[in-house]
Image (tube, rainbow, N blue to C red):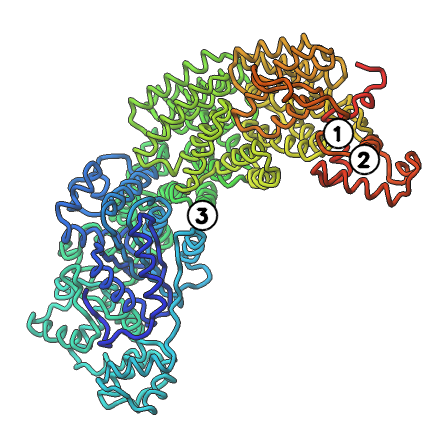
Amino acid sequence: MQQISVSPVFVGRGSEITELTEALRRAGTGSPQAVLIGGEAGVGKTRLLEEFLQRACDRGAVITLGRCLEVGAEGLPYAPLAAALRRLHRSLGAELEAAAAGSEGHLALLLSEFGEVDGEPNDEYSRARLFEHTARLFERLGAERTLVLAVEDLHWSDRSTRELLAFLVRTLHRSRVLLVATYRTDDLHRRHPLRPFLAELERLRTVQRLELERFRRREVAAQLAGILGTAAPDRQLVDRIHRRSEGNPFFVEELATAFQDGCGAGLTDSLRDILLVRVESLDEEAQRVVRIAAEGGSHVEHALLAAVLADDEEALIEALRAAVGANILRPDSEGEGYRFRHALVREAVSDDLLPGERHRINRKFALAVEAQPHLVPGDALPARLANYWYQAHDPARALPTALDAARAARRRNAFAEQLGLLERALELWDMVSEEVLAHTLRPYDWAETYPPGSCDHSSADADCDRIQLVDVLAEAVVAARRCGDRERGLSLAKRGIRLVDESEHPVRAAWFRINRARMLGNLRRSGDDEEIARAYALVDHLSPSAVQAEVFALAAGTAMLKKAGPEHIELAERAIRIAQQVGAHSVEVHARMTLGGLRHDVQGDADGGLAELAGAVDAARRLGVPDLLLRGINNLASAQRGLGRAEEAVRLAREGLDFADGNGLLRNIGTILTGNLVEALLDLGRVQEADEVLSACELSSLSGTHAEFLDRMRGELALLAGDLPTAATMLAQARAANRIGQVQHSVPISRLAMRVAAYGGRPLEARAELLAALAEDGRIGHESDVYPLLVEAAGVEADSRGLPEAEAGRAETLAAIAAAAAELRPRAPLHQGWARLLEAELDRARGADTPGQWAEAVAALRAAALPYPLALALLRGGEAEVQAGRREAATELLREAAELAAARGDRLLGSQITALAERAGLNLAPAGRPAAEAAPTGSPGDSFGLTPRERDVLRLLARGWTNRQIAEELYISPKTASVHVSNILGKLGVGGRGEAAALAHRLRLFPEDLDPAGR
């Protein structure tokens, strides 16, 4: 390892080295680790990293290092990863190439040595693929031996680098990889972009954060002893340097060097003076070279420095030799260049320049790079040149280079950097002349369907070929959306709307409005419908265009998620025709997918809708647009599940997840595909498999705009296990997404909330959940979600029949359930089975159900072949047979129901079945088991261990009586009644009187109290 510190000995940091070594050990066992080392400038982060990397190398680990470069507001995209891969290429050669096999075209975005870049679309999905292939490379490299990836100076990192590092930390599993990164804490102001990055990673159990403290006096003494070459430095010198340096190791080095040079007494307390004292000890020529190098960036190439100085080569070499010898500059082992030994020195030198001097030096760098572009690496050229001209305060040159650099960043999928450069261009726009705007700017780049040029294509305006301010805004809007900065995108879209004259350029105005609508929807804010409506009004009467087709398709698609009608089918068909006419193939496929969903949901044409969806999926395959294809697969899986075809839904969801994984899109659409897979697996009763899928999803840290879907699935699993507190927690998290008006999300969440309340003994809360859900529109087309909600709501009303507090409003609730059911259109055997089940539950709630009704429901649900609704119908049928006195028939039904509930791990349903069998004295053991094993017939409540007196108290408590009323009825004191109630609550495992009463009614512990007229 190259040493860059003055001190020849490594001082202190024993605990930090121990923790790093332990992280290396854990990584060596196949558990990837990450250690983030923070500390103020000069505190010794680099020295600690050097020491650790040397020790790791001695232990047989493969080590590589990359540094973030300071270029403008944020560094070069992926610079540290590119440097680290370059080091690995030099050290591993063929081994690295073998690990990269199959991913070369993607990894070439980071390192040109991998060959040509794949000619894939430069969009957010390409960046996702780059991330996936990078992770795969490191997993392969760390398969057999430990790989240590070190990244220095994260405080200068660009957003793309941070996101790629976060992706690696979250994604790498079961590989021997240790990531170590350093950053300066004193640079992290309140809004520094590294702050949320660190906070996010720190929550992960595999991430450790170390904070380096300043040296104490004892450590300063040890450091001085090593620098001065003495066993015991002078105590007064140690005290003075410790006081002045305040324990900062870098300042200790500077003060020690000044002392050796005989100028220690002349130093001031100014930090800048301390940092510059060594520079000022150089001769004038060396100082001039150092000042110019400081403006070149944190790293400057030798050839570039020579071109800027334009001096005699020998004189330059001598000046650089002096600067290196004084430990101000150091040769960069990564290339033909130099970097300052510490960033503080470069900053101090740069700050010491006069403003005009700084501008002049940056201008020289820019001119040199323009004249000889080969002086800097090709991937860094656009950003470096843009930054030099910007720092030169030359807007006429800074604007075009910023636009060029933004285009280059987009092509590397560095959307955050693209946005920053485009915003710089917007800042500079008004500072340049019309001549510059007319003749020096690049053409419009790309912003999806946006029509460029600030003029309609039918116009003869000559300005149509030159990029305009509004075009830059459009590029920035797309960049903001793709890098996830939707707040900024919202602001930029609003600026575009203000800038465009709607009467003159309605298509362009409509484009900005639909993009604003998309971002409002993603941010879950109101106003998206209004923006779409305005965009629709702008383009409805115009000639066909890609934007017009996109507006119509978006309007139809948004309606499909909320409240769609026949008019939206016509709108989707119109979007398809226009897209075909203008050649907007991606928009056409999107519209076809929407049309398939609308035919399925609105027209009730299940086969026609599925055929349209399948055709759109095939078209997406031919287009080769992965995100389009995945949207179609996801929609098709959802539609199949809605028709009760859960096996087909599982197959499609798995296909989509595999395709997303192979194309780097798992982080974009993996959440909703995983949710659809888990939901279909639960339908099939494959609970263990569903739990494993969710667990794997947590390990890979999938997230996105549908995270509430997975929260709801976790709540469903918790409810199956009888874990009501966890189910309630997951319910709250799912509801936090607030997807108002989207039935496919809101109804299942309401259903979960209703069941949590019902199982918790809160029937009125369950009723309120139902009524709130029924207040929403758009239930047509969502029978697979709405029928279970209505069935279980009717079951709550039936179970609470006879409960005094639930009587008020019962009739109205049952009428509301029946009215909602009348709106639905059963289109599959599953729907028919749910409909029969609902009819029987409504009659049970009125005390009028018959065994024949339940038999019809059972027969219909057998055809659907899904375990939960069938088990529920079998339970109710068994209960009806018990009431009719047909014990053998009841036993057969309940035995099958118990087997289904056990197979899917449904503890709550299973407990209801068991309780009913115990009360009826039925033996549910498989045939052949001794009849003596059957539970004997006993009094109500025996299964809970209630005494006869406690059963008497529970009977009165279930009628809603107070302790005083119970005491008077049973001739006991109110205090004794209170003791009995407390004992009852404990034995029933409930939290209050209301829950106890609800449980007694639900389990029919006192059936004679439910309906005085009998059944």
Q: Which mark is residue 752?
A: none
Assess whether mark 1 and mark 3 are in contact (beta carbons under 8 angstroms): no
Residue 504 showing in the rendered view: no
- Residue in front for this viewpoint, 917 or 453: 917
User: For the image shown, how many numbered marks are present on the structure?
Assistant: 3
Pointer 1: what residue?
Answer: 941
- 820 displayed left or right of 406: right
Q: Which mark is residue 488?
A: 3
Q: Identify the image quadrant of the N terminus.
A: bottom left
Mark closer to the chain start, 2 or 3: 3
What distance separates the C-alpha of mark 1 from that of mark 2? 9 Å
Residue displayed at 26% across by 71% down? 357
Q: Identify the image quadrant of the C terminus.
A: top right
Residue displayed at 23% across by 40% down? 106
Pointer 2: what residue?
Answer: 950
Mark closer to the chain start, 3 or 1: 3
Assess whether mark 2 and mark 1 are in contact (beta carbons under 8 angstroms): yes
Assess whether mark 3 and mark 2 are in contact (beta carbons under 8 angstroms): no
Which quarter of the picture shows residue 926? top right
> Looking at the picture, which amino acid does disc 2 mark?
Glu
What distance separates the C-alpha of mark 3 from that of mark 1? 63 Å
Q: Is residue 808 above or below residue 420?
A: above
